[in-house]
Image (cartoon, grey):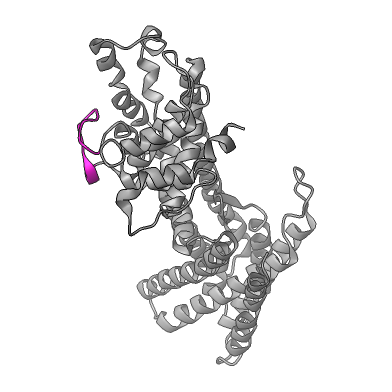
Amino acid sequence: MTPSLRWFLLAAAAPAVAAALLLLGLPPAAAGDPVLMVVLVALGATAANFTVMVSPRYKTDAAPAIDLAFVILFPPATAVALVGLSRILGDGILCLRRNPATGTRRRAPIDLVFNTSQLMIAATAAALVFRGFGSPGIIGQLVAAGLAAVVMYVVSTSLVVFAASRINARSAFQIWAEGAGVELRQTAAIYVAGYVMAVVSSGRPWLALVMMAPVAGLQLALTRSVQMREQTVAAVESMADVVDLRDPYTFQHSQSVAAHAVRTAKKLGLPDRDIELIRLAARVHDLGKIAVPDEVLHKQGRLTDAEFALMKKHPQTGVEILDKFPEYRRGRELVLAHHERMDGHGYPRGLSGSAIPLGARVIAVADSWDAMTSDRPYRKALDLQVALGELLRGRGTQWDAEVVDAFAQTLPGAVALEPEKPEAFGRPLLRSLGAVAGVLSS
């Protein structure tokens, strides 16, 4: 953790404390039911200990339901204090617990400070909105509660994803999009449950315990949703690996293509979300070969026209398989187009130029490189300089020129091109990569 990030996490405590003190200056109001306070604090602390990792860098829990209930049920200063107390207890327990797999504590003290502070800040904003927009009648209360929930979500999430972006050197919006794509509906449902909890438990603390059942159910549904997605992706990738295993010459081909494609996509400066999409598609780009007969797949010599026509069906077959999995909804187009060519002489649709999705163009270069540098039934692996020469000869006709350039720059020893002399690309780059073959083959 960098010093600047550490200071940011600690600095979040200052506005949280300031907000709590300023709220004390508001006109006094009834303190609220102390028994209900204790019950909700205990529930919030418990919820904080059951998190769901919705993306590699973003996790959530059911505590927002309790936090919104605090805002609706109690005066602003009390609500913010209770939100903070609930999170201190919840994260405090996590600070004491250890992960059995790693032996490390589940939460560091600095995380406790930041998590508590950002939730208090979010609760402050939500409480002010709720008190400011609340009006007599059920409609007025519903509108105020809805606005408070939106403000609480936006403020809390913004602080979290900004911190995550500093840790991972990624776009905050991209991190938010990864999580929101999975958990936004469940989070909305949790806030609705929090509102209902506040309404039914006022004066009846035991009903707050009853209302935790649907909240826990929503949390469980989110957990199952994330697990199902991960298991589906793992299962489909296992099928792709089985296809590779059918041919000893293509063992781990899809994994290698995915690795090359990711490095190239990063070199192109693509957003992380697009890079992950390319990785997913590259891992399963040859899935459709499961329908290609062994005598065609393993043929030692050149394919006949009929055999090649059969082989050319594998992108469409792969898409038909992936159609059954929503996780690949956006990646199917990349799988379908990974054998298209820039000059329009590819297959299955004869797309050309920018009509070919960029992700498919990236996969095409990675796929061709791995094919050329691997042993095949009909030839030995090409020398790395020869393979690179093939990519350069097809630069702009078979493969996207910009993608080839980016791929070449991912090879060890590569030197950036002079932008003012693009026509001299081939031979200077080959010279600059003269040591690449030795590095890669050693």
Q: What's the residue at 20%, 32% (across, down)?
A: 350
Residue 373 visible? The answer is yes
Q: Position of residue 112 (x, y in %)?
A: 70, 67
Q: Is residue 46 left or right of residue 345?
A: right
Task: Name the main secondary structure of what is drawn in magenta.
Answer: loop
- Write down the quadrant of residue 15 in the picture: bottom right
Q: Is residue 307 left or right of residue 289?
A: left
Residue 38 visible? The answer is no
283 or 137, which is in the foreground? 283
Q: Position of residue 291 (x, y in %)?
A: 36, 16
Task: Count every numbered label the image shows and give the total.
Answer: 0
Is residue 283 found inside the magenta-colored segment of the image? Answer: no
Q: Quadrant of the N terminus?
A: bottom right
Q: Position of residue 3 (x, y in %)?
A: 68, 72
Which residue sits furthest top? Answer: 295
> Residue 142, relative to residue 277: is it above or below?
below
Question: Which stretch appears magenta?
Answer: 342-355
Q: What's the residue at 47%, 18% (across, down)?
A: 380
Q: Is residue 359 left or right of residue 14?
A: left
